[in-house]
Image: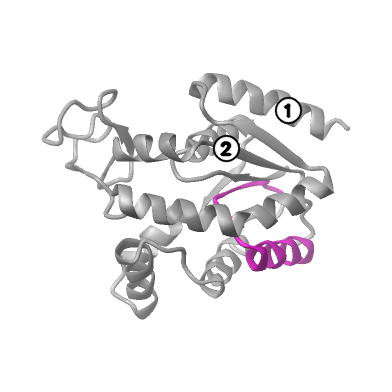
Amino acid sequence: MNIIILGPQGSGKGTQAKMLAKKFNLEHLEMGKLLREIAKQDSPLGKEIHKTINIQGKLVDDKIIEKVLRSKLHELPRERGIIFDGVPRREDQRKYLDKELKNLDRQLDAVVDISLPEKDSVERLSKRWVCGNEHALIMGKDIRSKEDKCPVCGSEIRQRIDDTPERIKTRLGIYRKDTKPVIGHYREKGILVEIDGRPSIEEVQKTILDKLEKILNE
């Protein structure tokens, strides 16, 4: 099974993707994490990605996405399903991924789109913290103070450089404009699962599983 999960920043798509990957034994291809890892590298590509996502607060060029996707897809065993987290976000990325999946004899079974109002996205991301091992933490739930250590691994915690209200709003605006045609394409194909991201993690997961079951059994 191959699934795409989309949603604006703060919608919880990463958490839901991890849960789906575990339930169905899928490879979790998280584009944001892959890009952040490359952005830490002292290389021309790493510096370019760092400037784009961490300093300018923008989305990286489609050619970079294609390069990262191509490398990752060809590493994976063909018999293992994939959940694509946060990609494709633009029409050119969608066309490239469709072509690459076809070349690899993979079928796209469903696309999950988790929606969330802008004010909720800004509020959620303003409370989001991470540690050096990229464990996602929430202020008020996992930690009480910025002086706390990661409860998972004990390392220092920090906020991502692009998780300021201004940069969040910039990313959300870009996301809405660029991803609308992508969502529309998959809706026309009849494989789109539309989800309200405002309820609890457990409620959202149940809704996703219920709707996936219906669409996969049609």
CA neighbours of label 1 inside 10 A, class few (<14), some (14 to 19), many (20+): some
Label for residue 211?
A: 1
Residue 42 spot, x, y in % from top left: 28, 74
Please tell me whether residue 173 is drawn above or below residue 136 in the rendered image: below
Q: Is residue 9 left or right of residue 149?
A: right
Closer to the camera, 41 or 144? 144
Specify whether 70 is left or right of 1. Answer: left
Q: Which tag is nearer the camera, tag 2 or tag 1?
A: 2
Check the image and report above or below for 186 versus 117: below
The span shown in magenta is 79-103
Residue behind mark 2: 115
Give the residue drawn at x 76%, y 27%: 213
Secondary structure beneath label 2: strand
Does the rendering let one see residue 89? no
Q: Is residue 71 left or right of residue 56?
A: right
Q: Earlier in the sequence, mark 2 or mark 1?
A: 2
User: Which of the 4 quarters of the picture holds residue 76?
Assistant: bottom right
Location of the N terminus by quadrant is: top right
Q: Left or right: 57 with respect to 183?
A: left
Whether residue 3 appears in this view of the structure is: yes
Quadrant containing the C terminus is top right
Q: How is the image coloured?
A: one colour
* Quarter of the figure with residue 89: bottom right
Q: Amino acid at mark 1?
A: Lys
Q: Could you tell me the amino acid type at mark 2?
A: Ser
- Comparing 94 with 58, the one in front is 58
Q: Nearer the viewer, residue 104 or 215?
A: 215
Q: How many angstroms separate mark 2 from mark 1 (CA)?
A: 15 Å
